[in-house]
Amino acid sequence: MLDVAVAYNRYKYLGNEFLTWLWFMMDTDRSGLAFPEAESTELEIGNRIVLENNRQNRDETITIKGDGAGLEEGVLALKKGALVTEVSLIMKAPEAEWRFQIKGESLNITGLKPPEKNPAEKSEDIEERVLEQIAHVERAADLVHQLYQQFIQQRLSEDWAETTVPAITRWMNQAAAS
Amino acid sequence: MGLLSATMSLARYRVEGRIPDPFLETVRERLKNHAIREIDNDPAEKSIGWTCFENPFQPDFENVNLVFGTHLVFSLRIDKKQIPAKVLKKHLDMAVIKRLKQTERNSLTKNEKQELREEVARRLYVRIPATPNVYEVVWNYEGQALWFFSTQKAANEELESIFAKTFKLSIIRMFPFTEADMICGLTDEQKDLLYKAAPTVFQGGANA
């Protein structure tokens, strides 16, 4: 295998393409996303998205944040050639909600807020609390892994260039025009 | 941002290799062999080692619970001392004056000054308590997955180094390439495509 540091830098674009594809899928074909317990779980873009445009040595970073923020500027940045480098997601299951950010280049999960519990229901037993937190982290980590797996399978198929890239390009153009 | 915090951040790893039997005793023994060493009242600047999840400031690997469900849970502790720059400057200036007086000279060479700086820092390190940073590790041994509750580059590098030394196992951080290559179930043909892949151009320009 390649040296880890070389592989990290050479292929970090895959993580940014993944997050851009994820936004596209969430906007156009949410039911096409395959992740654990998808039938009972909803996935939404949260309150922060970061895009970077490195085309023609531009090195621009566009950050959109805030609960009421629209994503129009993000779409415009995509049209100019930017990719999503960081996104916050909300995973909603019945009576539970996970919020976290994913960074494209590392696929690190940051700012993970598991479902809040009523203080009265909080256990004093450390083992119980640890197991509960592990289950919450597992849910988010499994989601990221399954989505990335779906992306990479598609990314390495013939469909990527023939179908997915033109569809993403159309989506960028249409979204920017509307 | 640790395991029991309201907000968590983590890096994901894959661990390859097996721990010899008896499994749990071996894990305890190895953690103990690389446990954190206290450096308060000691001239050391930094100490890195394992500690217990439940009692990170008094590790006792013999009696602590390491297994939670199907996971091993313990912590990495990094203790570091930092001398404020102005404090170091003050003590170094005083030491230089003293040395010049003792040697009846007007100046010190660059090497002499460097040696004096190290000596002053060592003296100060004895008097400064170390700041501890504790990062939890959750290891699903059977699933070969490990979570490290920090995304700081330096802390992750320390984890990779001490983990490999402690357990003699290969620990590989999951990022876009390694995740695709190792745990996404790619065929050999798909892996060849992955190695040759180049950035996608979505809008008629180069994105990379």
Image: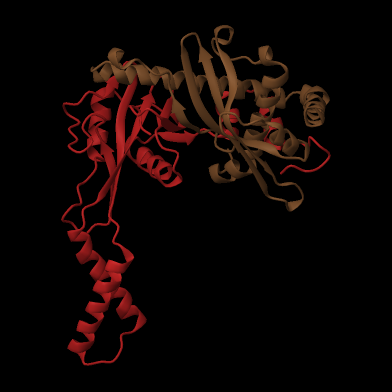
Chain colours: A brown, B red
Q: Is residue A81 left or right of residue B26?
A: right
Left or right: B41 in relation to A21: left
- Towards the viewer: A29 or B147: A29
> Is residue A131 shown above or below B197?
above
Percent coordinates x, y for residue B32 in the rendering: 22, 36
- Residues A92 and B150: in front is A92
- Going by the picture, which residue comes out furthest to the front? A68
- The residue positioned 71% from the left and 27% from the top of the image is A155
User: Which residue does the image show at 64% across and 30% down from the upper left?
Assistant: A19
Relative image position of residue B129 (x, y in whole percent): 21, 53
Looking at the image, which is closer to me, A113 or B26? A113
Q: Looking at the image, which residue is at 80% across and 30% down?
A: A169
Percent of width and height locating residue B2: 36, 32
The answer to whether any part of residue A177 appears in the image is: yes
- Image vertical order of residue A37 relative to residue A101, above or below: above
User: Residue A47 is drawn in which quadrant?
Assistant: top right
Residue nearer the viewer, A114 or B120: A114
Regarding residue B14, the answer to whether it shows in the image is no
Q: Quadrant of the C terminus of chain A?
A: top right
Q: How many circles with numbers are drawn on the protein?
A: 0
Dividing the picture into quarters, in which one does residue B208 lie?
Answer: top right
Res. A161 image quadrant = top right
**Taking A142 as reference, is B169 left or right?**
left
Query: Does A135 sit left or right of B195 as displayed?
Result: left
Residue pictured at 45% horizontal, 20% vertical = A138
Compared with A140, B118 (above or below) is below
Q: Quadrant of the N terminus of chain A?
A: top right
